Image: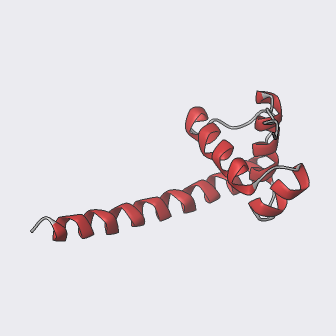
Amino acid sequence: MRRRRSFTPEFRAEAVRQALASDRPLSEMARELGIRADQLRHWKQHLTRAGAGAAPPGESPEQELRRLRREVAVLRQERDFLKKAAAFFANESR
């Protein structure tokens, strides 16, 4: 039986901070940290929602700008998806 690994909140926060500060793909960052890419993606979503845009301590203005631009891109993708889903379900109900 395989034992489930657990990670400290500090490890999760640091992993997400590194992922946000880097221009490298999440999958590459996850591989370096020894975790699954979907796990890192989940932590990132959870921490960015919980932080509601709060800048991590020690973040330079350039890093913050990069992080915020990435967040905007993700939010735009989510918005576009939700628009398409709403239009699809609106047509289905007719």
Front residue (pair 76, 81): 81
The image quarter containing residue 43 is top right
Residue 30 percent coordinates (x, y): 81, 54
Front residue (pair 3, 26): 3
Farthest residue, direction left = 94
Q: Is residue 59 left or right of residue 54?
A: right
Give the residue at x 67% y 51%. 41
Front residue (pair 58, 75): 75
Q: Is residue 39 above or below residue 79?
A: above
Give the residue at x 17% y 71%. 91
Q: Is residue 1 left or right of residue 92?
A: right
The image quarter containing residue 90 is bottom left
Give the residue at x 50% y 56%. 75
**Count of numbered badges drawn on the protein:** 0
Residue 29 percent coordinates (x, y): 83, 57
Colour scheme of the picture: secondary structure
Residue 80 percent coordinates (x, y): 40, 66
Q: Is residue 52 above or below residue 61?
A: above
Give the residue at x 23% y 64%. 89
Front residue (pair 39, 48): 39
Residue 40 percent coordinates (x, y): 72, 49
The image quarter containing residue 57 is top right
User: The C terminus is located in which quarter?
Assistant: bottom left
User: The N terminus is located in which quarter?
Assistant: top right
